[in-house]
Amino acid sequence: MVRYDKSTAEQGSKYVRDRRRSIGGGGRRGRGAVAAGGGIGAVIIALLAVLFGVGGDGSGGGTTFGLDTTATSLAGQVDSGGAPAIVDPDADTIEYMEFLMIDIQDTWDVYFDEAGLTYQPTLLNVFSGSVQTGCGNATSAVGPFYCPAPNDMQVYIDLDFFDELSTRFGAPGDFAQAYVIAHEVGHHLQSILGISDAVRNAQDQDPANRNQYSILQELQADCFAGVWAFSANNRLTRESGLPIIEEGDIEEGLAAAASVGDDRIQAQAGMSIDPHTWTHGSSEQRIRWFREGFETGDPEACDTFAASNP
């Protein structure tokens, strides 16, 4: 299980925007309801949508989709009749997302500073059902995604996705959640470094290899997630003095990366395995690039484009 300081999560709250319209009822019960381990570098639901012809343009962890600031969390509110505050079943998960967002971005801030660059933080928008973004309207069906539009450049997720990841694809655990967020922040890195624009230009100039460019972009985000895991694996929490990443987390992350490879998803959907339709990479490729980032801790080792230029 990923360990973290409560104080760090509190500081990270500035990077998480709770845009759920309502809280309560059934559903998940926070981090305690999910077993430890896992990871993801793809947006599973979005990939299935692409495979079945529903859409997706490969510019994020899944379909890119804006910014509606009217939806807020109801947790902690009291109605006009003095009723008790509504209990948020995902409060622990929200806190964990806050920790991840500040820890991942602090890690990249250090890397950028060492390279003489300035890191520009992003936000994580937690929504339920649907959300309006700078890239258009999105529903939970697209899975976690990053919107690269200049008036947005933020990450979006419906927390119910973690249930899908755990139950349908066999990748449970809080490290799976960390992998999701680290991958999506990886797309933010690509956006602020100009990589995303370069990929879109290459796709326009070489449409025959459009999917291949998408795969290389996704694998690089996997590698960036591995770089963060390397950093976290070498740090201790202030409160407990124990490593942030517990023994077994990385192995579970690698297993989860395998579970969301394009080939694995196609097989699970009862489809023939067709590399020409892939947009995120095979299980083997996803494992390889996450491992590359984790073993080297070097962002420069994540140049998937140089390693396999279409």
Image (spheres, rainbow, N blue to C red):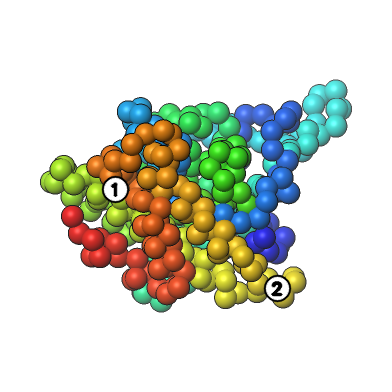
What residue lies at 29% left-to-right and 41% top-to-bottom? 274
Q: Residue furthest left?
A: 205
Q: Which mark is residue 150?
A: none
What residue lies at 36% left-to-right and 51% top-to-bottom? 282
**Sequence-first tag of 1 and 2:** 1
Q: Quadrant of residue 126?
A: top right
Q: Report whether residue 80 is seen.
A: yes
Q: Residues within 10 Å of mark 2 (few under 14, many from 20)?
A: few
Query: What amino acid type should be assigned to the residue bearing mark 1?
Result: Ser
What residue lies at 23% left-to-right and 61% top-to-bottom? 308
Q: Which mark is residue 214?
A: 1
Query: Mark 1 falls on what kind of element?
Result: helix
Left/right of residue 15 with respect to residue 207 in the rendered view: right
Q: Could you say which is closer to the camera, residue 199 or residue 309?
A: 309
Q: Residues within 10 Å of mark 1 (few under 14, many from 20)?
A: many
What residue lies at 29% left-to-right and 62% top-to-bottom? 304
The residue tagged 2 is 242
Query: Mark 2 falls on what kind of element?
Result: loop
Q: Quadrant of residue 29?
A: top right
Q: Position of residue 226 (x, y in %)?
A: 46, 64
Check the picture and name the quadrant holding the N terminus: bottom right
